[in-house]
Image: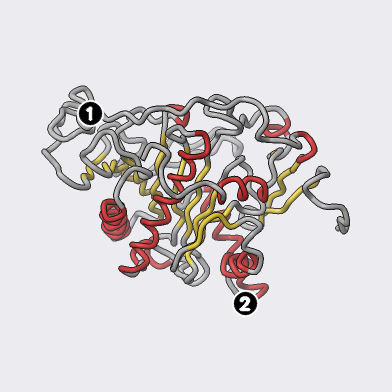
């Protein structure tokens, strides 16, 4: 492997992602001044606290016809149009070729409304309200993991129409699957391999590396968590949220860690909104230990934020061309993105 003597912020280079064991191409010379150009006018925060047409607001009928209760806190229910079903045939018609492989996949899909107020986002919610959401994530993880045939619980939020969110009401989805999906399975394999080779946790060691140079890629720190732009980030303002303590699952969060995580989620999403003074779109999700104790020793609980915006509310990063046919590529370095996010105020631009 070649040793680079020239600063990485001025030459094309590639960086290795040890979690997914893949490379990303970084081309900083393409955008020497990434903040030049368009500036989006600040958007006003909508104050529609209740929308009679919203199928997630309290008391309203959902698209499937079921009426929501007049909930006053967190509200969870089975998805009316789930991608997975708990009861599917145990076998499928045998394939006519070894290249045409399929098998049944059971699962459950849940929806969790964060708050009855239609206008809120994580950035605009109170910390204690976010703690209640985290408590619900713990309950949902525990309940779904008790099903003998469930092996993975994936909690994720698609925020904004740009990310395919069909409803602006603050909510997330929880998909519990019979098999561990590809992305967390790749991470698990990397974490296990690293533990076997080095005798330590990959993400614990990575946190120590980042804390040794907090001015490089760390955006926010609190008592129990750090938020950083990963060295190998693909999306322009990608953030990973990592606990300082090694543990694997939502159910292992202490009471103080729940508060710290709530504070971190609010701080990250507030900075995102402040970046272009808009309600910032993203996909966010947590990777945790599989159900039934698999991989608990080497899994390190963490969250990924994948936001698409690049230079303004209208200019986004697209994964096309070389990225689809070759490898992921970015222009803005992780260090530049982290510096930009770190410099933003912790108070929301809309007050």
Q: Is residue 26 left or right of residue 191?
A: right
Q: Residue furthest bottom?
A: 199
Q: CA distance from mark 1 to mark 2?
A: 50 Å
| Labelled disc at residue 199 | 2
Relative to residue 269, is residue 163 depicted above or below?
Answer: above
Where the C terminus falls, by quadrant? top left
Neighbour class for label 2 at 10 Å: few (<14), some, many (≥20)? few
Q: Residue at x 42, y 27 (%)?
A: 43
Residue 72's x, y, as percent?
15, 44
Label 1: state its secondary structure: loop
Relative to residue 224, is residue 152 depicted above or below?
Answer: above
Q: Nearer the viewer, residue 56 or 277?
A: 277
Neighbour class for label 1 at 10 Å: few (<14), some, many (≥20)? some
Query: Pointer 1: what residue?
Result: 55
Sooner in the amino-acid sequence: mark 1 or mark 2: 1
Residue 263, can we see it? yes
Residue 119's x, y, as percent?
28, 34
Q: Residue at x 36, y 44 (%)?
A: 122
């Amino acid at each position: 492997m070649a040793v680079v003597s020239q600063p990485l912020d001025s030459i094309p280079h590639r960086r290795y992602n040890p979690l997914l064991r893949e490379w990303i191409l970084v081309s900083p010379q393409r955008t020497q001044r990434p903040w030049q150009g368009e500036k989006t006018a600040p958007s006003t925060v909508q104050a529609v606290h209740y929308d009679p047409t919203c199928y997630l607001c309290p008391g309203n009928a959902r698209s499937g016809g079921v009426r929501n209760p007049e909930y006053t806190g967190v509200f969870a229910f089975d998805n009316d149009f789930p991608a997975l079903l708990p009861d599917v045939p145990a076998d499928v018609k045998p394939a006519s070729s070894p290249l045409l492989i399929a098998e049944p996949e059971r699962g459950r899909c849940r929806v969790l409304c964060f708050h009855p107020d239609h206008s809120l986002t994580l950035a605009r919610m109170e910390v204690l309200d976010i703690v209640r959401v985290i408590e619900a994530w713990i309950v949902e993880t525990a309940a779904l993991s008790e099903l003998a045939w469930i092996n993975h619980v994936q909690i994720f939020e698609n925020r904004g129409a740009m990310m395919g969110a069909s409803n602006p009401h603050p909510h997330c989805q929880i998909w519990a699957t019979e098999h561990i999906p590809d992305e967390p399975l790749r991470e698990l394999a990397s974490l296990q391999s690293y533990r076997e080779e080095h005798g330590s946790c990959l993400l614990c060691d990575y946190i120590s590396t980042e804390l040794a140079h907090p001015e490089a890629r760390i955006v926010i720190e609190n008592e129990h968590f750090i938020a950083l732009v990963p060295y190998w980030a693909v999306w322009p303002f990608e953030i990973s949220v990592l606990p300082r303590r090694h543990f694997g699952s939502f159910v292992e969060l202490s009471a103080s860690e729940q508060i710290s995580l709530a504070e971190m989620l609010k701080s990250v999403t507030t900075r995102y909104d402040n970046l272009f003074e808009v309600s910032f779109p993203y996909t966010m999700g947590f990777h945790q230990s599989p159900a039934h104790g698999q991989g608990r020793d080497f899994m390190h609980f963490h969250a990924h934020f994948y936001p698409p915006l690049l230079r303004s509310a209208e200019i986004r990063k697209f994964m096309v061309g070389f990225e689809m046919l070759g490898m992921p590529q970015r222009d803005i370095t992780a260090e530049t993105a982290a510096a930009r996010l770190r410099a933003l105020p912790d108070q929301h631009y809309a007050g």
